[in-house]
Image (cartoon, rainbow, N blue to C red):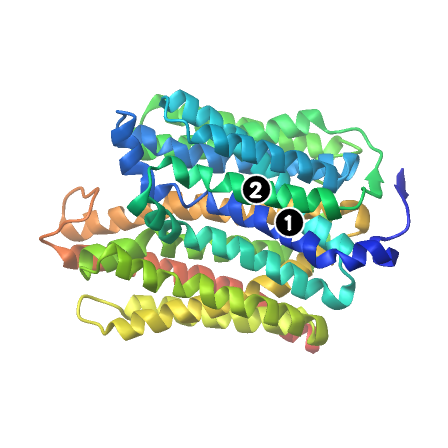
C-alpha cells in the first residue's frame, strides 16, 4: 500500500528554497563522486607513507567503488520505505565522518575501514539525490535541475586527478579526504535549514534476501576482477570469487522474480525509455573512464607534458560539461530530451574518433578539440538522459529508480577502470611480442598502438549508444 501526501510542488516554502536544496544535494553528489577518482593520484604517496605495496594501496580506490555498487539498490529501496531525505541526511553524516577518519594516517586497515564508512554514506546520498530533485522541482525545471546534478557528477568524476594534484603539491594526502569535512558540514547545515520533511512513503517489507544476494554478487564479481588484475586470473581464489558471483547473481534473479515486493522490480525495465537511458548512461561512463585511465599516459609519458599542463588540458572536459549541462537540461524541458541526448552522443562519438587519430606527432590542438567535444557531448547528453530515467517511473518508485540510475554510472566507472588497463596492456603486449604491464619509455609507439585499440573500442561502445538513441528518436517520429 502506498500513502502519499500533497506534492512538494504545491508547497510555497519548499519551492522558495528549491535551489538551495539543489545546492546541498549537488555538493554531496560532487564530493561522493570525486572520492572515486581523486585518490588515484595519491596512491604512490599513500603507499610510501603507510609502507605498503602499490597493489595493496589500490584497494583504497577499489573498495570504495565496490561498496557503493553493492549498496545503491538497497538504499534506494530503503529510501522509498523510510523517506529519501532521511536517508540522504544519514548518508551525509556518515560520509563526513568517514572523510575525517580517512585522513588519520594510522595503517591500511584503518584507512580501508574509514573508506568503507565513506562509501556507505556516498551510496546513501547517490541513491537518493535524483529522487529528491525529481520530487521537489516542477516538470518545467526538472530537466535543468537534473542537468545540474549531472554536472556535479561529471565534475566529480573527471576533476579528481586535477584537484588531487593541486592538494598534494602543497599538503599531505590526508587533505584529499579532509577537504570534504568543511564542505560537507556547510552542506549539512544548509540541508538542515531548508530540507522539508519526507512526504512519500511505500509501506512494503524490505527484500533482505535480495539485498544480500545483490551485494554479494557485486563484491565477489568486481573483487574478483581487481584481485585477478593483481595476482592473475588463473588463480583458484579468483575463480572462486567469480563462481560465488554467478551463484549469488542467479539467486538474486530467482528471488526477485518470486518476491511480491522485490528489491529490484524487473517490471521497471519494461519501460523502453527507462531501460535504454540506463544502458546509454552505463556505456558512456565506461567510455569516460577509458579516457580517464589512458589519457594521463598519453599526455605525460608519450607527449612529455608536465602534470600541471596535463591537468589544465583535462580540466577542459568538466568545465565545458558544467556549462553545457544546465543549458541542455533547460532545452530538454522545452523541446523534449530525446533529440538532445542523440546530439550529445554524436559529439562524444566524434571525440573518440579524434583520440584514435592522435599519435606521437599529432598537433595537440586535435587532442584538445577532442577533449572539448567530449565535455560538450557529456554535458548535452547527461541532463536529458537523467530526465528520461526519472520521468519514466511512478512517484513511489523514484527512490529505487534514482539508485538504479546511480548504479549504472558507478558500474560504468568500475567497468571502465578495471577494463581500460587490461585492454591497454593486452594490446601493448600483442604489439610488443611479450608481456607488458607498464609504459615502455623506449617504445612509445607500443603505447600508441594500445591507446588506439582502447579508443577504438570506446568509439564502438559510444556508437552502440548513439545508434540505440537514434533508433528511439527516429522510430518515434515515424
Secondary element under disc 2, as helix, strand or loop, is helix
Residue 426 numbered mark, or none? none
Labelled disc at residue 25? 1
Q: How many other residues sit within 10 Å of disc 2, few (<14), some (14-19) or many (≥20)?
A: many
Residue 337 placed where, x, y %? Answer: 66, 69
In the image, 62 versus 103, the foreground residue is 103
The residue positioned 86% from the left and 55% from the top of the image is 11
Q: Residue at x 46, y 65 (%)?
A: 319
| Residue 404 horizontal/vertical position (percent) | 63, 45
Residue 223 vertical position relative to residue 323 in the rendered view, above or below: above
Q: Is residue 255 above or below residue 38?
A: above
Which quadrant, please, contains the N terminus? Answer: top right
Disc sitting over residue 184 in the figure: 2
> Residue 315: percent from the left, percent from the top?
39, 61
| For marks 1 and 2 on the same chain, the one whose residue lies earlier in the sequence | 1
Q: Quadrant of residue 12?
A: bottom right
Q: Is residue 246 visible?
A: no
Residue 364 visible, this orientation? yes
Quadrant hosting residue 451 = bottom left
**CA distance separating discs 1 and 2:** 10 Å
Give the x, y percent position of residue 157: 46, 51
Amino acid at each position: 500500500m502506498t500513502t502519499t501526501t500533497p506534492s512538494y510542488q504545491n508547497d510555497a516554502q519548499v519551492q522558495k528554497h528549491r535551489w538551495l536544496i539543489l545546492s546541498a544535494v549537488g555538493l554531496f553528489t560532487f564530493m561522493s563522486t570525486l572520492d572515486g577518482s581523486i585518490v588515484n593520484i595519491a596512491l604512490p604517496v599513500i603507499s610510501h607513507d603507510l609502507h605498503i605495496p602499490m597493489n595493496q594501496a589500490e584497494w583504497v580506490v577499489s573498495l570504495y567503488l565496490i561498496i557503493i555498487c553493492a549498496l545503491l539498490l538497497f538504499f534506494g529501496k530503503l529510501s522509498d520505505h523510510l523517506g529519501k531525505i532521511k536517508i540522504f541526511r544519514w548518508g551525509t553524516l556518515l560520509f563526513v565522518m568517514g572523510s575525517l577518519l580517512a585522513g588519520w594516517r594510522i595503517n591500511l586497515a584503518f584507512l580501508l575501514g574509514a573508506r568503507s564508512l565513506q562509501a556507505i554514506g556516498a551510496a546513501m546520498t547517490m541513491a537518493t539525490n535524483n529522487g529528491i530533485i525529481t520530487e521537489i522541482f516542477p516538470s518545467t525545471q526538472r530537466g535543468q535541475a537534473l542537468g545540474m546534478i549531472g554536472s556535479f557528477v561529471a565534475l566529480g568524476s573527471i576533476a579528481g586527478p586535477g584537484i588531487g594534484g593541486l592538494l598534494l603539491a602543497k599538503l599531505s594526502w590526508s587533505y584529499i579526504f579532509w577537504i570534504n569535512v568543511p564542505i560537507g558540514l556547510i552542506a549539512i547545515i544548509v540541508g538542515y535549514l531548508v530540507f522539508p520533511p519526507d512526504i512519500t512513503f511505500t509501506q512494503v517489507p524490505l527484500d533482505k534476501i535480495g539485498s544480500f544476494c545483490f551485494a554479494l554478487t557485486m563484491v565477489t564479481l568486481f573483487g574478483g576482477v581487481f584481485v585477478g588484475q593483481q595476482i592473475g586470473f588463473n588463480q583458484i581464489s579468483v575463480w572462486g570469487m567469480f563462481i560465488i558471483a554467478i551463484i549469488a547473481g542467479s539467486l538474486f534473479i530467482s528471488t526477485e522474480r518470486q518476491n511480491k515486493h522485490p528489491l529490484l522490480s524487473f517490471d521497471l525495465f519494461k519501460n523502453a525509455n527507462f531501460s535504454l537511458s540506463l544502458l546509454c548512461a552505463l556505456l558512456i561512463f565506461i567510455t569516460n573512464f577509458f579516457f580517464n585511465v589512458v589519457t594521463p599516459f598519453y599526455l605525460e609519458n608519450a607527449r612529455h607534458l608536465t602534470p600541471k599542463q596535463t591537468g589544465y588540458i583535462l580540466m577542459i572536459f568538466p568545465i565545458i560539461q558544467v556549462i553545457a549541462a544546465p543549458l541542455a537540461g533547460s532545452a530538454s524541458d522545452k523541446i523534449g530530451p530525446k533529440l538532445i541526448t542523440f546530439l550529445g552522443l554524436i559529439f562524444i562519438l566524434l571525440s573518440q574518433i579524434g583520440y584514435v587519430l592522435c599519435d606521437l606527432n599529432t598537433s595537440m590542438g586535435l587532442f584538445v578539440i577532442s577533449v572539448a567535444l567530449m565535455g560538450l557531448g557529456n554535458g548535452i547528453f547527461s541532463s536529458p538522459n537523467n530526465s528520461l530515467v526519472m520521468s519514466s517511473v511512478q512517484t513511489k518508485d523514484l527512490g529505487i529508480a534514482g539508485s538504479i540510475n546511480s548504479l549504472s554510472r558507478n558500474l560504468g566507472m568500475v567497468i571502465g577502470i578495471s577494463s581500460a588497463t587490461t585492454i591497454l596492456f593486452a594490446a601493448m603486449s600483442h604489439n610488443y611480442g611479450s608481456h607488458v604491464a607498464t609504459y615502455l619509455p623506449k617504445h612509445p609507439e607500443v603505447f600508441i598502438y594500445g591507446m588506439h585499440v582502447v579508443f577504438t573500442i570506446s568509439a564502438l561502445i559510444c556508437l552502440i549508444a548513439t545508434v540505440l538513441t537514434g533508433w528511439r528518436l527516429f522510430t518515434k517520429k515515424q
